[in-house]
Structure formats: C-alpha cells, structure tokens
Image (cartoon, rainbow, N blue to C red):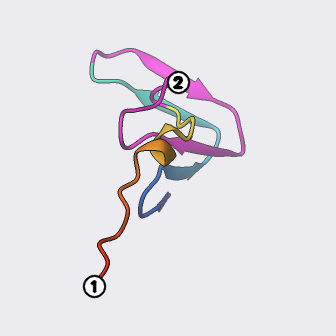
C-alpha cells in the first residue's frame, strides 16, 4: 500500500474492503485508489474529488 500526501491510498489489487457497517466491496483492478477524505461520490474508491478541495499554501 502507498499513502499519498493529499490523495488516496493506493493498493495493489484485487482488493476486498470491509466497511464500518459490515458490508464488503471489491475491486479487481490491478491498482485501487481508496478514498481517504470521504469526498468521493464513489466512496470507498477515489474519484479525485479531493482535488477540488485542496488548500493553497500560505505565502511567506
């Protein structure tokens, strides 16, 4: 698994994820992007919604 700074966790697939309500979701892709910000319309998988909410760095 690779954790990205401002984005998803990247996991070599296929994967099976158990959600907090006990349901299971699967993906057979070779690389799966798991949403860490919960903004995805396809949660728990990333749809790049985090890109719309990035904060700009403060200028010195």
Determine whether 48 is above or below 5 in the image: above
Name the residue tied to disc 2: 42
Q: Is-magenta flag for residue 15? A: no
From the image, give the main secondary structure of the stretch colored magenta: loop
In this rendering, position of residue 34 left or right of residue 38: right
Determine whether 19 is above or below 50 in the image: above
Residue 45 location (% of width, % of height): 52, 33
| Measured Cα–Cα span from mark 2 to mark 1 | 37 Å
Badge 2: residue crowd in 10 Å (few <14, some 14–19, many ≥20): few
Determine whether 8 is above or below 58 in the image: above
Residue 22 location (% of width, % of height): 32, 16
Q: Which residues are magenta?
A: 21-44
Residue shown at the point (71%, 38%) measured from the top left: 29
Residue pushed farthest front? 59
Residue shown at the point (29%, 72%) measured from the top left: 58
In front: label 2 or label 1: 1
Q: Is-magenta flag for residue 27? A: yes
Residue 35 sits in which quadrant? top left
Query: Which type of secondary structure does the marked residue at label 2 adopt?
Result: loop
Determine whether 5 is above or below 60 in the image: above
Residue 26 location (% of width, % of height): 57, 25
Residue 33 sits in which quadrant? top right
Name the residue tied to disc 1: 60
Residue shown at the point (55%, 50%) measured from the top left: 11
Foreground of the two, 5 or 15: 5
In this rendering, position of residue 30 left or right of residue 49: right
Residue shown at the point (57%, 35%) measured from the top left: 47
Badge 1: residue crowd in 10 Å (few <14, some 14–19, many ≥20): few
In this rendering, position of residue 59 left or right of residue 25: left
| Residue 13: numbered disc | none
* On-image quarter of the C terminus: bottom left
Query: Which type of secondary structure does the marked residue at label 1 adopt?
Result: loop
């Amino acid at each position: 698994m690779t954790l990205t700074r401002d984005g998803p966790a990247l996991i070599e697939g296929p994967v099976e994820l158990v959600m907090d309500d006990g349901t299971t979701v699967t993906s057979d892709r070779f690389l799966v992007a798991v949403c860490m910000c919960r903004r995805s319309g396809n949660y728990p998988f990333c749809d790049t919604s985090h890109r719309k909410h990035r904060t700009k760095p403060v200028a010195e």
